[in-house]
Image (cartoon, grey):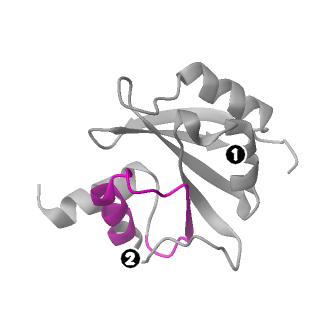
Amino acid sequence: MSGTAKESSTAELLGLRTGLVIQELGWDDDVDDTLRVAIEDGIDSEMVEEAVEAVDAVLLWWREDDGDLVDGLVDALTDLTEDGHIWLMTPKVGRPGFVDASVISESALTAGMAVTKGQHLSEDWAASKLVRPKGVPR
């Protein structure tokens, strides 16, 4: 697969496309930069850290020792549009910082969100899509 096809398919798998504003939170030197570049190429823009307007999606890198996931999710909702979603990026099973699926589900529920699907996009990181349930006010 060519670099361009890989970049396009990564963004497409995440439902991201050109023109969307994506906020990135939790970046550190352990994140998958190839995945980040593929997403930015797929949306034809850089992800923002500090939002100056509402964002369409949040890419949240999270590790077990990053603190309370509920707090992290609530913070990630701050700049998110009403129908936006969060891609929660966590280390895969067996990797340092792994977050158990039950913790993700319970934290999402407590934060007023639901886990809808997961994607395996890189060797070390898994992605979980979190959305606000339909009909639930912000």
Q: Residue furthest left?
A: 1
Determine whether the residue tagged by mark 1 lies in a helix, strand or loop. helix
Determine whether the residue tagged by mark 2 lies in a helix, strand or loop. loop
Q: Which label was assigned to residue 58?
A: none
Q: Mark 1 points at which residue?
A: 73
Q: In this view, does 63 lie to the left or right of 138?
A: left
Q: How far apart are marks 2 and 1 (CA)?
A: 26 Å
In which quadrant of the rendered view does residue 21 lie?
bottom right
Q: In this view, does 7 lie to the left or right of 64?
A: left
In which quadrant of the rendered view does residue 92 lie?
top left
Q: In this view, does 114 lie above or below 25?
A: above
Residue at the spot 59% in from the left edge and 42% down from the top edge: 66
Q: Which amino acid does label 1 sit on?
A: Leu
Which residues are the magenta region? 18-41
Q: In this view, does 11 lie to the left or right of 1?
A: right
Q: Name the residue under label 2.
A: 44
